[in-house]
Amino acid sequence: MPETSDLFIFWAVVAARFLIPLTIPSYPLPGIILSLVLDMVDQTLFQEFTNLPLVDYQEYDKALDIYYLAITYLSTLRNWSNFFAFEAGRFLFYYRLIGVAIFEITHLRLLLLIFSNVFEYFFIFYELVRLKWDPKVLTKDRLITATAFIWVFAKLPQEYWIHIAQMDTTDWIRANPSNVIVLIAWAALLIFLGWWLLRDLPPMRPGLIIAASYKHFPFYSLHARNIRDNYTSQRFFDDFLHYELIEKIVLVSLLSTIFAQILPEVRASSFQVAIGLSILIIINTELSQWFARRGTHWKSIIQEFIVMSVVNFGIVLAYDFLITRFDGSINLLDASFFILLLTLNVTLYDRYRRWQIWSQAEMDVFADQNKQIKAAD
């Protein structure tokens, strides 16, 4: 039996890995850096301060990595004004997500090298630029070049080191302190490549933009209200055919597949979990449309999360009541975890996707106005 102190440290680290990423939408760079640092040191914390066996650490680590990467991706819906950067980030995120889902099923380490986590460093690169420049200075060519540099010079060596060679950097340096020179040289190369990418950008603006720069759409704005009502008045089956619902199902299904591999009491297959959560997502979408048609618009994301969590728990409890009549059962503890995971991601996706649509609509209006002004001149 693990000691009480060991369990306290374990759950404190797990709680931190779940809570810290929630700062990313509001404070992207500090949030992702803290999440990344905690990801790097948690194994060392367990080794130094607990006697816990770390046999399943790889699965646990990859699942929590994907959790904070999902929050990171959802924050780009809310915050990123460079649409090509958003599209590139979305591809890189789902590329990694698919690779980790397959890895959790097959445990083939080579997959973590092939499906390298380029999205994380791509996100950091974008947010570093946003500190001092308008992200629109990142052209398609510059973003593609940055992605290639990150993939080849940063992530491939790192993924090989961690997952194929299975080397621990701390132990490697302890064995030969001069190895730190190699790390310094590698870091210097990455800094030089970053400087080369940004060498001809416009002059930097004063100060640092640390908090997220997103367009807030107050409900009392007439134009924002028209855009909002036009979006939310779509019928459910129209929305069903749009990629938003499909993307939510893919996102939550892949996340649930990954977490189903590390939760000890999950009896359902990954496919069964994905089907069950997909049905819940469809119900949630219909409920959201119903609320919107009745004029209910959430003023707080926390309020929306709590209400939808209660609704989803009610659905699961009703299902559990019915299935026991046919000698079936579900694990309510595991079901509760999946409900919270689903509700969090769907709530963030729905809210941030709406903001992205409204932001693009506003930009289109301003572009049309500028064209009309130029034509008049």
Image (cartoon, grey):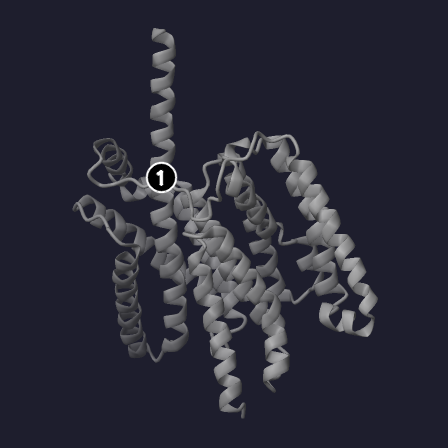
The amino acid type, in three-letter code, at marker 1 is Lys
Q: Where the N terminus falls, by quadrant?
A: bottom right
Q: How many marks?
A: 1
Q: Which residue is mark 1?
A: 215
Residue 238 makes an appearance in the image: yes
- Which quadrant, please, contains the C terminus? top left
Q: Quadrant of residue 15?
A: bottom left
Query: Horizontally, is 226 left or right of 199 in the view?
Result: left
Q: Is residue 46 found left or right of 206 in the rendered image?
A: right
Residue shown at 38% from the left, 71% from the top: 335
Q: Is residue 35 left or right of residue 376?
A: right
- Judged left or right of residue 109, residue 253 is left
- How far across and how far down the image is residue 199, in percent? 66, 34
Badge 1: residue crowd in 10 Å (few <14, some 14–19, many ≥20): some
Residue 88 position in % (x across, y down): 56, 40
Q: Residue lying furthest left in this view?
A: 294
Secondary structure state at the residue bearing disc 1:
loop
